[in-house]
Amino acid sequence: MDALECIKTRRSVRRYTDEVISKETMDEIIDTAKMAPTWKNTQTLRYVVVSDRAVIDKIKDESILSHEGNGKTLASCNTLVVLAQINGRCGYERDGSFTTSKGAGWEMFDAGIAAQTFCLAAHEKGYGTCIMGIFDDKKVAEAVSLPEGQTVAALISIGRPKFIPDPVPRKETGELVKYM
């Protein structure tokens, strides 16, 4: 699949088959995702791959802040990726000061690029994904024993889609762009 087709056909998938993703396939997806650009090449993103049903259920039951949609998605997936970031590097100078007025905001910017790159790599291999952002960071970090100095940036469910959702309407390009 070429890049444009991959971008245009990728959907947020929330229902999955029972198929288990092999470690080799997950490594291939992450090997592609690691190519996402990062602030000054800091490469601060980390991937915690969770296939233990008890851990996924713990996150579903204790960490999703009553977001029923995320609960249903987590109940359906056999694999969850906890996208984590190393704190205090992205957006900072070596002396600890911020480089720009965006402050630590660059950390989430890099996490977003990495999440989308991961999702596109998975889609190219026939897997569906859904990026979730409504969760209790500390409870998820505890559930996956995240090392000190790292923060959970996103949850990404992944699996073979039960079905491919229809595309949602998008705004017209003219509404999104201004030429000067």
Image (tube, rainbow, N blue to C red):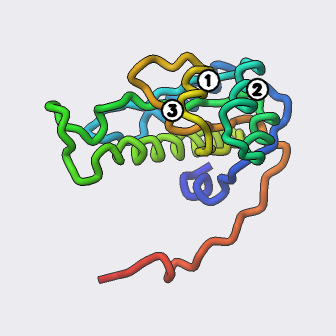
Label 1 element class: strand
Q: Which residue is mark 3?
A: 152
Q: Is residue 170 above or below residue 115?
A: below
Disc 2 from disc 1: Cα separation = 14 Å
Residue depicted at x 42% and y 44%: 108
Q: Position of residue 46 (x, y in %)?
A: 47, 27
* Lower sequence index among marks 3 and 1: 1
Label 2 element class: helix
Q: Is residue 34 above or below residue 91?
A: above
Q: Which residue is mark 2?
A: 57
Residue depicted at x 43% and y 31%: 85
Say which quadrant the C terminus sits in.
bottom left
Residue type, numbered disc 3: Val
Q: Which residue is mark 1?
A: 49
Tag in front: 2 or 1:
2
Q: Quadrant of residue 119?
A: top right
Q: Are marks 3 and 1 in contact (CB under 8 Å)?
A: no
Q: Quadrant of residue 96?
A: top left
Circle 2 Cα neighbour tier, 10 Å, few/some/many (<14 / 14–19 / ≥20): some
Q: Position of residue 144 (x, y in %)?
A: 59, 20
Q: Position of residue 127 (x, y in %)?
A: 71, 39
* Lower sequence index among marks 2 and 1: 1
Q: Is residue 71 left or right of residue 112?
A: right
Could you say which disc has been placed on residue 126 in the image? none
Residue type, numbered disc 2: Asp
